[in-house]
């Protein structure tokens, strides 16, 4: 089964002096190019996560400014794809289809936390660099809006620039990602965006009350816009107990069934959050992705439904947005 995964943090794991070879073959992480090939991946979205200063110090990262770090990460991915003949960067639907027809995996570049995209000129610069998705916020307030992690900010909407950014991203062809965004910001994106948007790595708040997840109304709103919701494999976003440390396939199936029942089968997608999550992961790496599809077959899902989750829905979103 081909699949498209909307979110992994693997680039963040490369040591400061590490080689781009670690994106190709590295069994210490959850995603590498070789295992993407083994698992029959169609496309992987690679997030460039903008760390806070304390996180850089903890992980012994150089204290670059955001633009320098983004350029560093883009260079790593470019170098890695140039070293292989089976992974190639993609920037739109036509690239993805061409790569797939040539038995190549598509790598899409994203930024997690729009804090550095503080002007339309900067957004255009990132687009020119190959970035095709921006997660508008992370866990802190930024130039776009507010996070869903802070109860005092959860109902706040997009800032004025955030609305302008959404409109501009529609215009130039970038995917708007509402994972991490405040509830108020979510509805502002829904009301502002003329194109489909995504929650790249979020689950159902009804089944797991973590604020990173989506309410049933949000699920329906994403579906109404023709967008997609990427199933997150993080234990805390799967269980009723948000302190749970076990990521189980059974819980994933429950979330997918609930999202399908609530928003329909056309909103389903994958957003593993590999290399950005921890705990006891039943699907601990991309090579184990087929285990989820097999569990869905046992649960009574048709092949067409599984294909929609795995790649067809995201193909549509990419075509409609990029």
Image (cartoon, rainbow, N blue to C red):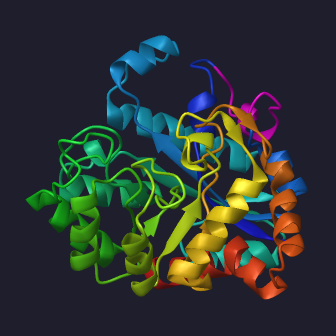
Residue 80, x across and y down, in percent: 70, 43
Residue 186, x across and y down, in percent: 29, 64
Was residue 26 drawn as part of the magenta stretch in this picture?
yes
Asked whether the viewer can see residue 197, the reply is: no
**192 sits to left or right of 72:** left
Was residue 76 drawn as part of the magenta stretch in this picture?
no
Residue nearer the viewer, 85 or 253:
253
**Farthest residue in the left direction?**
160
Residue nearer the viewer, 289 or 83:
289
Above or below, 266 relative to 81: below
Q: Tally the marks.
A: 0
- Residue drawn at (59%, 71%), measured in percent from left and top? 258
Residue stretch in magenta: 18-29
**21 sits to left or right of 64:** right
Above or below, 75 relative to 172: above
Residue nearer the viewer, 295 or 311:
295
Residue nearer the viewer, 108 or 252:
252
Q: Which secondary structure type mostly characterizes the magenta part of the structure?
A: loop
């Amino acid at each position: 089964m081909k699949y498209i995964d909307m979110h992994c943090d693997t680039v963040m794991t490369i040591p400061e002096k590490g080689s781009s070879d670690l994106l190709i073959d590295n069994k210490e992480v959850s995603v590498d190019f070789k295992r993407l090939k083994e698992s029959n991946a169609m496309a992987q979205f690679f997030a460039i996560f903008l760390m806070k200063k304390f996180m850089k110090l903890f992980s012994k990262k150089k204290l670059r400014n955001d633009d320098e770090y983004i350029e560093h990460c883009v260079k790593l991915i470019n170098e890695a794809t140039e070293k292989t003949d089976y992974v190639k960067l993609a920037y739109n639907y036509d690239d993805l289809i061409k790569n797939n027809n040539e038995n190549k995996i598509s790598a899409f570049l994203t930024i997690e936390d729009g804090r550095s995209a503080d002007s339309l000129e900067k957004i255009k610069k990132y687009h020119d660099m190959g970035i095709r998705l921006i997660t508008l916020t992370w866990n802190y307030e930024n130039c776009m809006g507010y996070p869903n992690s802070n109860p005092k900010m959860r109902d706040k909407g997009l800032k004025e620039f955030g609305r302008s950014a959404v409109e501009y991203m529609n215009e130039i062809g970038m995917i708007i990602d509402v994972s991490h965004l405040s509830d108020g910001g979510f509805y502002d994106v829904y009301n502002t965006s003329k194109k489909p948007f995504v929650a790249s790595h979020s689950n159902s708040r009804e089944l797991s009350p973590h604020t990173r997840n989506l309410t049933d109304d949000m699920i329906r709103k994403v579906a109404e816009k023709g967008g997609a919701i990427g199933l997150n494999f993080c234990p805390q976003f799967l269980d009723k107990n948000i302190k749970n440390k076990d990521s189980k396939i059974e819980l994933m199936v429950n979330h997918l069934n609930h999202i399908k029942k609530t928003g329909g089968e056309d909103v389903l997608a994958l957003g593993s959050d590999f290399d950005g999550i921890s705990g006891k992961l039943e699907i601990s790496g991309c090579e184990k992705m087929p285990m989820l599809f097999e569990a869905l077959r046992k649960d009574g899902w048709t092949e067409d439904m599984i294909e929609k989750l795995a790649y067809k829905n995201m193909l549509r979103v990419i075509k409609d947005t990029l």
